[in-house]
Amino acid sequence: MSIFRLGDQKPPEPKRINDDVIERFEHVYEVNPEKMQTFPQQDMPAWDTMRIVAARWDHLAWMHKHFADDVLLAGLGSETMPEEEETR
Amino acid sequence: MIASLDSGVLDELRAIIGDDDRVLDNLSSRVVRTRVPAPFPVHRWGEHLPHVAVLPTSAQEVSEVVKLANRAGLPVVPRAGGTGLSDGAVPMRGRGGILVDVKLMNKIHEIDLVDRTVTVGPGINMLKLNEELRPHGVFYPDDPASYPCSLVGGRIGTGGWSLLGSRFGHTRDLVISMQVVLPTGEIVEIGEGGGRKLRKSSTGLTLKQLFTGHQGTLGITTEATLELVPKPELEFAAFFAFDDYMTAHRTTGALTRAGLATLAGVVLFDEWKLRYLRRDDEAYIPQPDWVKAVVAVAMYGTRAEVEPASKRVMELGRADGGKYLGDEISEGDWASRHDRYATPLHGRTREGQVVPMSWHCEDAALNYSVLPQVREEWHAIVERYIDEYGIFDDWGMFAYTNGPHKPWADYLVEIDVGIWEQKLDDDNWAGWVACKREIAEVALKYGGSITACHGATREGDAELVPTEMGSAWEVVKRIKAALDPNNVMNPGKQMMDESYE
């Protein structure tokens, strides 16, 4: 039997993205806890966050296959955030 | 709270259905069939309960239930997925009645790969249907934002709108014929004329449109014969960012007028929507502040068509200063459009604190030319109500191409408003209804319709149905009274009680 222990895999310290958003894992955004005083943020272990993110990507990939045999893309990176594209 | 149903009526229902597990008068079975995802007066939940819910498995059972409702003078409320964004499937306050839940009528009766139709019960979901169709290389292209959870019967009843409507048409264009139980209990076949697989005829009257989008007021669809299209070989999606709304609006117009036959949809996000997305959507949080509007384009078809058309889309999307948002967002965000019901529902108070909010999506049908002005007036209305009540949050506006096969001139326009339902009481609910009514009045002022797809079945919209129908309202009332002489079929919806005055 597995027992949930937050301490087993505590998420890393957050990085502030803007006034509303923090980031603990790359491209995984969370509401800034300061904005969650009325309804406090739930503690989550890292594995659970990653499970939710992976499930979301699986779901989106499945959606594409559901609607068409193949997906065609322009083959271009972002023109609004070129710096970020270069660092990938 | 709704009073108990006469035990004699319950006994008759059990005799008709023949299975006590499909005649549900316990509280929990009725509570879960009372509301839909749209904001609901939760403080008056008990007053909207049906007396009983039944789950028929055949048209004959539906027919007998409707005949009983006529004898007993009870309302009948049809319900499929219960995923609508207005109140077609919600019992009217204080009326109760028999809720006919069609979820068990979910069979595929026939797949005809020669004449390209599929015949189904109203309780089947499009996602499940397409999983069954996939091995045959065909597709049923009705694609609402509730694609994974809404059902064919509800789509027909509400006259649903599809994300892919510019390419394949909307629900009413995709239903070829149907079997309907009329408000008096007769079972009739409704189509274009002739057999149930004909797409066009000129015999008699064209009744099919009358039985799509009536919000459950003219009968219950018990079987539908639907269009099959070849499964698209290729999907192409591209998202473009703009530093002001009007440039994005011009680009939207250029894309829709380009004559690209594979164009399935163009979506225009306004400044308020970008503000909301930059706050709460993973794809937009990192976007720079200058991004004030976004235009999204999607195409479906054969490789031979979509590949060259995609190059034209990339030219048009950037011709007036648009910047491509990149493959990752274009691919991922378009996929998420098929399933907006997975969106986490939280909003912000005026002080910026996160609170649980339900999603209200107020829709209208509007012409291209009036989109900029309506956008300003709608946001000004919502802003006033946010200031006054403190339980609403403006989540921005979308405009989606709306004309079936003709994307160039009219749009499904939506303003998304978060509502803190836990704070609802009579005053706050009245405030919300007044806000809705003001939004709908603006749509009418600009020659629009108060709803492109959700239906005008809720307080705040319903009162305006006679105004929008104008001189045709008398015709509507005569049709309703003729088909439903005892006013049992979803009574009170869309002001149709006036048919009996």
Image: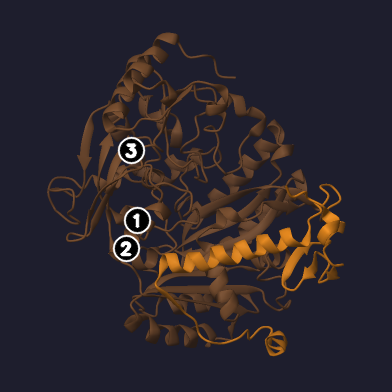
Chain colours: A orange, B brown
Is the residue at mark 1 from the same chain as the one at mark 2?
yes
Name the residue: 55% across, 33% down: B32
Question: Which chain is disc 3 placed on?
Answer: B
Q: Nearer the viewer, mark 3 or mark 1?
A: 1
Q: In which quarter of the image is the N terminus of chain B?
A: top right
Residue B132: image tag = 1
Question: Which chain is disc 1 placed on?
Answer: B
Find numbered disc 2 in the image and state the secondary structure of the residue it sits on. Answer: helix
Name the residue: 43% across, 64% down: A66
Q: Residue furthest front?
A: A1
| Residue B263: % across, % down | 39, 74
Label 3 crowding class (10 Å Cα cut-off): few <14, some 14-19, many 20+? Answer: some
Question: Which chain is disc 2 placed on?
Answer: B
Q: Name the residue under label 2.
A: B135
Residue B33: image tag = none
For this rendering, which residue is in front, A15 or B78? Answer: A15
Check whether the beta carbons of the residues at disc 1 and disc 2 lie within 8 A of each other: yes
Q: Distance between the residues labelled 1 and 2?
A: 7 Å
Check whether the beta carbons of the residues at disc 2 and disc 3 lie within 8 A of each other: no
Q: Label 1 sits on what residue type?
A: Glu
Quadrant in which residue B490 is drawn: top left
B486 relative to B297, above or below: above
Find numbered disc 3 in the image and state the secondary structure of the residue it sits on. Answer: helix
Name the residue: 72% across, 72% down: A27
